[in-house]
Image (spheres, rainbow, N blue to C red):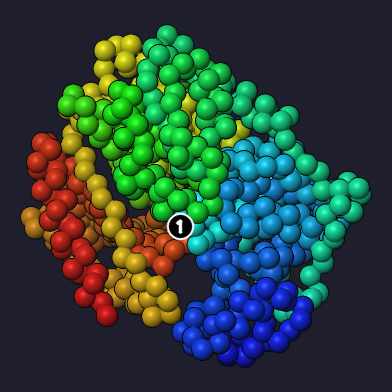
Amino acid sequence: MTYIKRYEEWVNNKYFDEETREELKSIKNDNKEIEDRFYMDLEFGTAGLRGKLGAGLNRMNIYIISRATQGLADYIKEYGKEYMDRGVAIAYDCRHYSVKFAATAAQVLAANGIKAYLFEELRPTPELSYAVRTLHTAAGIVVTASHNPKEYNGYKVYWEDGAQILSSTAKGITEKIKSITDFSTIKVMDIEEAKKKGLIVILGKTMDDEYMEKVKGLAIRDNIDKDIKIVYTPLNGTGNVPVRRVLKERGFTNIIVVPEQEKPDPDFTTVGYPNPEDVKAFKYARELGKKEGAELLIATDPDCDRLAIMVRDTLGEYVAFNGNQTGAILIKYVIEGMKENGTLPKNAAIVKSLVTGDLGRAIATKYGVETFEVLTGFKNICGKVNDFKKDNSFEFIFGYEESIGYVAGTFVRDKDAVIASMLLCEAAAYYKSKGKTLLDILNEIYVEFGYYRENLISLVLEGIEGQERISRMMVEYRKDYLLTIGSSKLTKFIDYEVEKSYDILNNSEEPSGIEKSNVLKFYFDDDSWYAVRPSGTEPKIKIYMYSKGKTLKAAEDKLVEMEEVIIAKLQSTK
């Protein structure tokens, strides 16, 4: 069926509500917009659904949510009554329609005889992971678009271990979704009826309290300066209550919240693009920090699973740390603290994504802690917990990604900015008690392990044409990649799509040892490397670049050279 036929079907079918049909009628003369909304179904993958809000098959709306949930329900039913009775936990963030989408999902599950545990109000994404594990539900759903702009929303699915679904599960759910060709066949139960029947159960304070106690149980030290002045911005998201609560209960007395970004705001009026990786998101926090003389600025993204920081330097300015730098600080603090307390396991391990830098690995190696590398995503990072338990080989103590995601402990199987905020503030307070800032500690790390520099460049290519060009780029780059960058020579490259690692120097190959994925990674003889992969949730191709030098200038010069050569090579693909 053509996209025009799909469009006309939605406009003329009275199953769809009047508001939806009127919205579609308003674009009747905009062929490009009609095409974009109907040329494909919004794709369900290992990240679930994520897209722009609006009417249509390639948009986020109650019909797409209900179909995805019916597919999930049908998938759970195949596991039998026990899984149906265990139910599904559901959380949501502050975005437009999040409440409605979460309720719709609960109603569809209830209509299929599957109990839904629905949080009473917005909650951070990691608490959903905790709820799945605590309640032993079959699955979990979070309605969120993380750090995307206000026009977006999303639907992430978790499985019984509390981690986001793996590709095998996503494939099974996708097959069920695709088998639903008529939206009117989707089952939906009235929400009040579902509550009376015990098919929708509301979660609240009890779950919050249990989760908070677990988070506080990860604290490393108490001999710290808890009077350290910290400015916090939740960026109008879900972090305001849990982050402030954990810091207060840990005894921090000087936490100042950015007032304009304290309360939930689905329009993110003060920030626009609510991604704390972008230093522009710190505008209000920086202004307040200077006014108050704060030593540290912290920000969590709208669903509170990612944390970014800025640290005051000797001139009173604030320096932004990237995810690799913050990860290195946390690894140093956690490992040294556990070692000091006598709680560091002999078989301790940290886990990072394959596009995350190697500074954390260098620190871990110093203390005899093993580092494991996995595909991007915390479902893969936290998935190592189960692998370790199977053969009793290692004990997971910390996992992280360069995209400002971190987790400690194993009671949450996703990145957790509540945990990360507590540990990072604790680290800053500890080092302050020693007369040092986090900037001092980072510089000490560089002196000891070498100067690491990195950059992520995303080429945004939207629409059908963009999607096709991204595919061509990956195909062409597999056949024609860089053998040198300046004086650096390629020594090894890994094609995760074919699960092979190629040794250039010895002209040999071996299995990559990591699950199949559309990623390429290239290593050079001076410890520089880069990786290329399409984004799983956005119309982008991402290039991760890393350099290392004996001096800061050497590392930075190498990175500039890499950026110029690699981007030029990629953009040559038309």
In this view, which residue lies farthest toward the top? 223
**352 to the left or right of 558:** right
Quarter occupied by residue 162: top right
Task: Locate the C terminus by quadrant.
Answer: bottom left
The residue shown at (19%, 46%) is 547
The residue shown at (72%, 35%) is 204
As rendered, which of 483 and 25 lies closer to the eye? 25
As rendered, which of 254 and 214 lies closer to the eye? 254
Vertical position of residue 395 compared to residue 381: above or below:
above
The residue shown at (20%, 69%) is 569
Vertical position of residue 312 compared to residue 110: above or below:
above
Helix, strand or loop at label 1? It is loop
What percent of the width, then of the height, locates residue 486?
Answer: 9, 58
Look at the image and tell me whether residue 341 can be seen. no
What percent of the width, then of the height, locates residue 224?
Answer: 40, 12
**222 to the left or right of 4:** left
Look at the image and tell me whether residue 64 can be seen. yes
Instruction: Characterize the local packing of mark 1: few (<14), some (14-19) or many (20 or more) Cα atoms within 10 angstroms.
Output: some
Task: Locate the N terminus by quadrant.
Answer: bottom right
Quarter occupied by residue 549: top left
**95 to the left or right of 179:** left
Q: Amino acid at mark 1?
A: Pro
As rendered, which of 167 and 183 lies closer to the eye? 183
Vertical position of residue 296 compared to residue 481: above or below:
above
Question: Which residue in the structure is indicated by mark 1?
Answer: 149
In this view, which residue lies farthest toward the right? 197
